[in-house]
Amino acid sequence: MSDTAQQNQAELIEEFEMFDNWMDRYQYIIDMGKQLPAFPEEWKTEELKIQGCQSNVWMHATRDGDRLHFDATSDAAIVSGLIAVLMRIFNDRPPAEIAATPPSFLEDLGLDKHLSPTRSNGLHAMLERIYQVAKSEA
């Protein structure tokens, strides 16, 4: 694992550059989602559900020392992959680092342009939750 969220973004962009087309990139995102850790059923509550997502998304955050740990899941394969992308960048980081890391990967990867408007809204809702938790824990 890299030292910073910024380095993780750079690594992710580099990985995506290996793929020639968006179908391969989507498949890679879906495959990342399949590797998410199991999400306990008892965490699938209204309180942990993220509003603004077309599919169901739940995110659970815990503090571990000076770092924030996120667990999340979705009932949609592509959304689980987007969660995995976010986790790769922001998970297990200090709150101040999370809050200070702009999601430049969205533009660099062209994700915003290649997701449907509802998926893009959901991705932004998940990012918003991550930043909200980071700010409240900072």
Image (cartoon, rainbow, N blue to C red):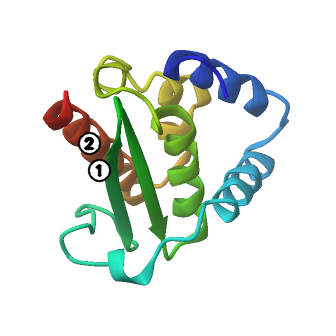
* Percent coordinates x, y for residue 10 in the rendering: 64, 18
Q: Which mark is residue 108?
A: none
Q: Residues within 10 Å of mark 2 (few under 14, many from 20)?
A: few
* Percent coordinates x, y for residue 107 in the rendering: 50, 26
**Placement of 128 over or under 72, stated as above or below:** above
Asked whether, in this view, residue 66 is left or right of residue 109, the answer is left
* Percent coordinates x, y for residue 18 in the rendering: 85, 30
Q: Are marks 2 and 1 in contact (CB under 8 Å)?
A: yes
Quickly name the residue at label 2: 128
Residue appearing at x 60%, y 30% in the figure = 109
Type of amino acid under label 1 = Ala
SS class, disc 1: helix
How far apart are labels 2 and 1 at the CA level? 5 Å
Q: Which mark is residue 125?
A: 1
Farthest-out residue, bottom:
41
Asked whether, in this view, residue 92 is left or right of residue 50, the answer is right
Farthest-out residue, left:
136
* Nearest to the observer: residue 116 or residue 134: 134
Q: Residues within 10 Å of mark 1 (few under 14, many from 20)?
A: some
* Percent coordinates x, y for residue 56 in the rendering: 38, 74
Quarter placement of the N terminus:
top right
* Nearest to the observer: residue 25 or residue 46: 46
Farthest-out residue, front:
65
Name which quarter of the figure residue 7 lies in: top right
Residue appearing at x 55%, y 62% in the figure = 80
Q: Could you tell me how many numbered marks the image carries?
A: 2
Asked whether, in this view, residue 26 is left or right of residue 103, the answer is right
SS class, disc 2: helix
* Nearest to the observer: residue 53 or residue 45: 45
Type of amino acid under label 2 = Glu
